[in-house]
């Protein structure tokens, strides 16, 4: 089915559906009835078709019988004609002086024809001058009304018939006569050629003519083409008749058979379409030549395709006979030129943006052809890009991969160098929070790539771009973890050899990763309604993994801050519950150190990070304090140790309460209160105190309780042994509660 037929059928179907189903309720009310009605109509049509087919078969059989009879009649007529010819030849001998009479008749006919020919030749130049004048009026402006065009063509057509007939009759004359005649007709030949060129100039400018409201000129052009086509058909029919007559004529026959037509076949219709093809080629070449190698701009300049084809459909198609199929011609011509231009593009070294724009153009091109012009992709051949879309996608992804790796590598090299050398403090924002520029720049680049992929409207491509971004971001996270770990080891093992500012840069990295997690979450929300449902889960999984990775890096950085902080106070915790603890004020040293660090942390860390850091600092403080109670050098002197523990807890409470809620802080410090209770408990109440301890902290190991009691100086060996036997017996009564959340004891080393 061609484009025009397809469009007519589709329009008719849509119009009928629109007539039948005018209201939404029609789908429920009318469809069953329509289905029954159409079923009956189908049965009726099938019956009619069967009857019609049988009638056609009968007609064909009758036609075959008639054809056989006609053949017999033709043979009979042929034999009769041959007898008539023989009778004619025989009768000539019966008339006295027949050859002389026949010769005189022919001389008279030739004399009359010669006289008429001379009159025509004498008036030729005068007619040509008049035609030339009218033609010049039209020719002055190619976009003029061309009101004389049909009259000029009529006169030239008649003069050309006269010329062709004259030269045909003189074909047996001497060369001098032929040359003289051709010279005499030279002016006609020149004018005919000029007029033909004028016609094809109009054809080349067909679109511009209808834009300028000169549709009547196109109609006249079509009439001329049709006239010349009919003349060509008659000439071809005469030539075929001449050939047939020659086959029938026997040697020596006196009948004057048809000699064919002297006309030269012009094939105006073919020439017209050739001119259109050339003009469209020139149009495309001009359009794209001005952009040179700027293929992206060339794609932007293709809007004329749909405006031109719409103009053809609305203004040009009604002015041509249907047999010209002018709209399909224009559609396929434009399509093939687009195809050639795109093939030239994909041979070049295109950048990522142009590749995406090219892929988007192809998809939008087919969509516009269908929606604006009713031309489906199946009707457009050859297929744009020859099905190489996937190869272009792969090329684009390679470019994206290379660029992202290149950009992130350069950024990470710069940031890593700054982090290691630390020859200047990290940058900070208006709130005083430390940070570095890499995160912002990296997400600017990633958002650019994602934006371009979103604009392509290709779900699979967007997924692949997100996958590439996921890969480079995960690589950057891995690099930061490795770098943080290696620099921490230097800071701990060789503190005198490393540059200052390690803590500041760790805070900057932690802040950047929280900010990067926020950037990633923003991308997730932005793509929520833009990703194809087919790829949504995969895209979300990639981005959520990246977001979790950034939070993990920030957590890792917080851990490093805690490592640095507690590395300074770890020796002090090593002396807790030892003789120095009783003689010196150790806890104030710990709190003073924590206070100094927290002052910087609160000033330069993201608020969320600082809150988490305080929680983890308190947890680590408790772990170290409890682990110190198990030290081999630890000894609990009664009752001095009880007062010291209360003093330590009070100092810790006063420090941490500045950053945490009282209720939450008291709950977390309760573990030391339970330890305090176990230390001051006597033999009668210790089992109840252990029960309370175990209830509050189901994961407290029995060995911890044993270590505490073993270091009490008020318990002798027999008393300690008796108490532990009772506690062990009590411990066996407890079933482990697997659903209970872990406590601080799960963080301790055992």
Image (tube, helix red, strand yellow):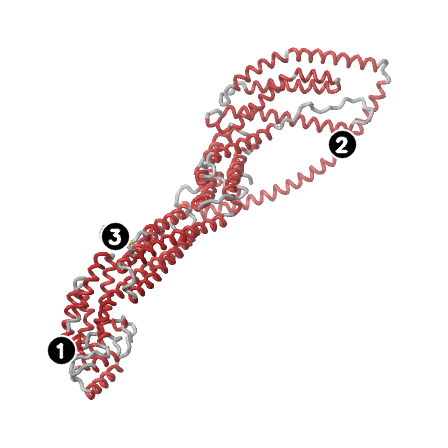
Are the two marked residues, 1 and 3, in contact with CB atoms closer than 8 angstroms? no
Tell me where residue 245 appears, x and y as whole percent.
75, 27
512 over 704 or under it: above or below: above
The residue wearing badge 2 is 73
Residue 687 as seen in the image, left or right of residue 84? left
> Mark 2 falls on what kind of element?
helix
The residue wearing badge 1 is 640
Tell me where residue 625 appears, x and y as whole percent.
21, 72
- How many residues crowd mark 2 within 10 Å: few (<14), some (14–19), many (20+)? few
Q: Quadrant of residue 255?
A: top right
Mark 2 or 3, closer to the camera: 3
| Sequence-first disc among 1 and 3 | 3
Residue 149 as seen in the image, left or right of residue 580? right
Tell me where residue 86 appears, x and y as whole percent.
83, 24
Which residue is painted at 52% across and 17% down in the image? 137
Tell me the quadrant of the picture where the C terminus can be found. Answer: bottom left
649 over 679 or under it: above or below: above
- How many residues crowd mark 3 within 10 Å: few (<14), some (14–19), many (20+)? few
| Name of the residue lying farthest toward the front | 497
> Mark 1 falls on what kind of element?
helix
Q: Nearer the viewer, residue 23 or 416?
A: 416
The residue wearing badge 3 is 428
Residue 569 as seen in the image, left or right of residue 83? left
């Amino acid at each position: 089915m061609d484009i025009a037929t397809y469009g007519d059928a589709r329009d008719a179907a849509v119009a009928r559906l629109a007539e039948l189903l005018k209201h939404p309720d029609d789908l429920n009310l009318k469809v069953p009835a329509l289905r029954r009605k159409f079923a009956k109509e189908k049965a009726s049509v099938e019956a009619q078709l069967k009857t019609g087919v049988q009638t056609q078969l009968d007609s064909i059989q009758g036609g075959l019988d008639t054809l056989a009879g006609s053949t017999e009649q033709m043979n009979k007529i042929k034999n009769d004609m041959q007898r008539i010819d023989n009778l004619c030849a025989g009768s000539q001998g019966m008339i006295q002086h027949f050859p002389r009479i026949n010769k005189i008749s022919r001389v008279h006919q030739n004399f009359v024809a010669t006289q008429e020919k001379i009159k025509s030749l004498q008036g030729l130049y005068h007619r040509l001058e008049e035609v030339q004048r009218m033609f010049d009026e039209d020719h002055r402006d190619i976009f003029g009304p061309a009101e004389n065009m049909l009259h000029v063509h009529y006169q030239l057509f008649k003069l050309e018939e006269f010329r062709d007939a004259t030269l045909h009759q003189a074909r047996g004359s001497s060369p001098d006569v032929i040359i003289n005649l051709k010279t005499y007709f030279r002016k006609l030949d020149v004018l005919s050629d000029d007029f033909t060129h004028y016609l094809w100039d109009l054809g080349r400018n067909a679109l511009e003519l209808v834009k300028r409201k000169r549709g009547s000129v196109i109609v006249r052009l079509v009439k001329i083409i049709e006239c010349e086509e009919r003349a060509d058909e008659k000439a071809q029919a005469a030539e075929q008749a001449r050939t047939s007559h020659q086959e029938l004529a026997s040697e020596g026959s006196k009948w004057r058979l048809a000699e064919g037509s002297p006309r030269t076949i012009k094939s105006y219709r073919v020439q017209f379409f050739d001119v259109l093809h050339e003009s469209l080629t020139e149009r495309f070449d001009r359009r794209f030549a001005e952009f040179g190698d700027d293929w992206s701009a060339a794609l932007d300049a293709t809007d004329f395709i749909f405006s031109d084809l719409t103009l053809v459909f609305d203004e040009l198609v009604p002015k041509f006979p249907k047999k010209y199929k002018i709209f399909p011609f224009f559609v396929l011509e434009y399509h093939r030129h687009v195809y050639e231009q795109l093939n030239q593009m994909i041979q070049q070294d295109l950048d990522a943006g142009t590749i995406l724009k090219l892929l988007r153009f192809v998809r939008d091109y087919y969509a516009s052809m269908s929606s604006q012009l009713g031309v489906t992709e199946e009707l457009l051949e050859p297929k744009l890009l020859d099905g190489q879309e996937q190869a272009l996608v792969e090329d684009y992804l390679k470019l994206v991969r290379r660029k992202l790796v290149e950009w992130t590598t350069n950024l990470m090299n710069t940031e890593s160098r700054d982090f290691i050398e630390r020859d200047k403090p990290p940058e900070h924002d208006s709130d005083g929070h430390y940070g570095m520029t890499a995160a912002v720049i990296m997400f600017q680049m990633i958002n650019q790539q994602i934006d371009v992929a979103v604009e392509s409207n290709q779900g699979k491509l967007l997924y692949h771009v997100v996958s590439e971004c996921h890969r480079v971001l995960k690589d950057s996270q891995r690099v930061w973890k490795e770098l943080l770990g290696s620099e921490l080891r230097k800071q701990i093992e060789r503190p005198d050899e490393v540059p200052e500012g390690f803590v500041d840069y760790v805070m900057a990295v932690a802040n950047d990763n929280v900010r990067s997690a926020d950037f990633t979450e923003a991308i997730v929300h932005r793509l929520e309604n833009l990703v194809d449902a087919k790829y949504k889960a995969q895209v979300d999984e990639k981005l959520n993994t990246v977001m979790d990775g950034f939070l993990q890096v920030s957590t890792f950085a917080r851990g490093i801050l805690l490592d640095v902080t507690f590395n300074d106070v770890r020796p002090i915790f090593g002396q807790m519950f030892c003789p120095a603890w009783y003689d010196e004020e150790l806890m104030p040293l710990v709190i003073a150190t924590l206070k100094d660090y927290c002052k910087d942390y609160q000033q330069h860390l993201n608020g969320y990070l600082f809150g988490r850091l305080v929680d983890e600092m308190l947890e680590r403080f408790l772990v170290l304090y409890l682990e110190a109670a198990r030290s081999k050098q630890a000894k609990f002197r009664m009752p001095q140790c009880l007062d010291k523990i209360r003093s330590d807890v009070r100092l810790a409470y006063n420090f941490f309460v500045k950053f945490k809620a009282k209720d939450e802080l008291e709950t977390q410090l309760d573990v030391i209160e339970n330890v305090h209770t176990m230390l001051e408990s006597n033999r009668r109440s210790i089992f109840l105190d252990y029960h309370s301890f175990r209830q509050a902290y189901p994961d407290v190991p029995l060995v911890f309780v044993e270590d505490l009691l073993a270091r009490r100086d008020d318990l002798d060996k027999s008393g300690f042994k008796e108490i532990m036997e009772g506690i062990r017996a009590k411990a066996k009564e407890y079933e482990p509660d697997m659903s209970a959340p872990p406590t601080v004891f799960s963080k301790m080393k055992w």
